[in-house]
């Protein structure tokens, strides 16, 4: 088995110099020396002993990512961006945990990664004021929240929180529909105590209130069963379309859906029944997943700056893992409208 001494011998350098390369300490190293060592590592197929590195440094260059569902395209996009930046910029790898929004699975994942010496995790779309998160923080786990619970007087900020301004996203969606002369509007969401959902609905209602308009009825909240989770978001949209068709004499002029997958499910169901989008009803989503631009009609949606948010999450988390003492902060990123074809444009 090839060892670090073999690499050092072939490269004509000391073992400590090779160690510096393996640990990213290359700022003072000559370019040709670095390139020679990297080529020797490649030629010899050398694999560093991660366990030995961990024993020496007291840390492992990995962190966890807890997501509610692998099947949600928006979460999949986020993980893809996180993995690439973590690997290319910081030399870190990620371990994924699929939690299904279950407290027991969240707690188990945190305990498991901690047992492997992993000291940090990004928590996606979860309320991090739960006891198992607080316990993990008290035991030294560094957490960063994405699209989760923001602080308040009642809930002080314990960890970094990075989110799109979901209130603004709801406002933007409602405002765009109103600008097209559509006033009979409804918000369609999924049942669940998720702060980002609450803020999107609140922003939608706030924008309508500014114009003296009431939403059509109460917002439509679809109850989930075992068959309706994050993996079945389009089916939830289809179910919402059926409920609207069978419970109302007249459809709203415009609908804001809680996310793109629900919006796409509604469009598919409406059109299968001969209801044209956007001629008969306009629909706007929130997320801007990659599928949205390929559907017919292409979905008008609200987009977040996901790469910038991912970079901020990684910087804050890895700085903490590597010993920097940072005061917890909240970072809100502004959404933007992506205008496509699912909203009837005022001529």
Image (cartoon, rainbow, N blue to C red):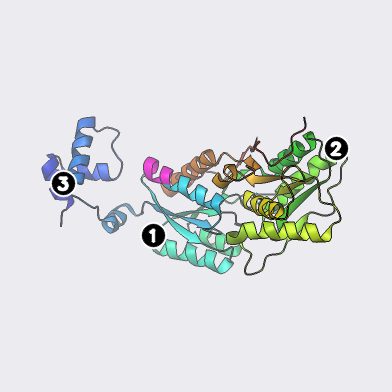
Quarter holding the C terminus?
Answer: top right
Instruction: State the residue lying farthest toward the right.
Output: 212
Mark with earlier residue (3, 2): 3
Q: Nearer the viewer, mark 1 or mark 2?
A: 2
Q: Is residue 198 magenta?
A: no
Q: CA distance from mark 1 to mark 2?
A: 54 Å
Query: Which of 61 and 164 lies nearest the eye of the viewer?
Result: 164
Q: Residue at x 78, y 35 (%)?
A: 180
Residue 27 visible here: yes
Mark 1 lies on residue: 117
Residue on which the image places disc 2: 211
Task: Pick whichever of labels 3 and 1 is earlier in the sequence.
Answer: 3
Which quadrant of the structure image shows residue 245?
Answer: bottom right
The disc label shown at residue 7, or none:
3
Which quadrant does the N terminus fall into? bottom left
Magenta part of the chain? 84-90
Mark 1 Cα shell of 10 Å, populated few (<14), some (14-19), many (≥20): some
């Amino acid at each position: 088995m090839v060892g670090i001494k073999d690499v050092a011998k072939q490269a004509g350098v000391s073992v400590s110099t090779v160690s510096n390369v393996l640990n990213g300490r290359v700022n003072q190293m000559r370019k040709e020396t670095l390139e020679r060592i990297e080529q020797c590592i490649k030629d010899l197929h050398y694999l560093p002993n991660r366990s030995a590195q961990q024993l020496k440094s007291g840390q492992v260059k990995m962190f966890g990512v807890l997501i509610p569902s692998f099947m949600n395209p928006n979460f999949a996009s986020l993980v893809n961006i996180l993995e690439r930046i973590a690997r290319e910029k910081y030399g870190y790898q990620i371990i994924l945990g699929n939690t299904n929004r279950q407290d027991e699975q969240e707690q188990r994942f945190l305990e498991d990664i901690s047992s492997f010496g992993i000291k940090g995790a990004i928590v996606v779309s979860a309320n991090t004021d739960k006891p198992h998160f607080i316990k993990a923080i008290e035991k030294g786990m560094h957490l960063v929240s994405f699209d989760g619970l923001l602080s308040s007087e009642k809930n002080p900020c314990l960890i970094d929180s990075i989110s799109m301004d979901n209130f603004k996203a709801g406002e933007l969606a409602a405002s765009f529909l109103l600008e097209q002369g559509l006033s009979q509007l409804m918000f369609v969401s999924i049942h669940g105590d998720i702060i980002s959902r609450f803020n999107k609905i609140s922003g939608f209602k706030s924008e309508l209130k500014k114009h003296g308009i009431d939403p059509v009825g109460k917002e439509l909240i679809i109850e989930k069963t075992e068959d309706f989770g994050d993996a079945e978001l389009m089916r939830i949209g289809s179910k919402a379309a059926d409920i609207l068709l069978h419970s109302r004499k007249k459809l709203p002029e415009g609908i804001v859906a809680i996310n793109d997958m629900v919006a796409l499910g509604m469009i598919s169901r409406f059109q299968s029944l001969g209801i044209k989008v956007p001629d008969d009803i306009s629909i706007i989503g929130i997320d801007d997943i990659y599928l949205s631009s390929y559907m017919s009609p292409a979905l008008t949606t609200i987009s977040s700056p996901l790469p910038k948010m991912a970079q901020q999450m990684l910087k804050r988390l890895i700085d903490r893992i590597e010993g920097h003492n940072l005061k917890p902060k909240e970072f809100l990123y502004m959404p933007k409208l992506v205008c496509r074809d699912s909203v009837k444009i005022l001529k």
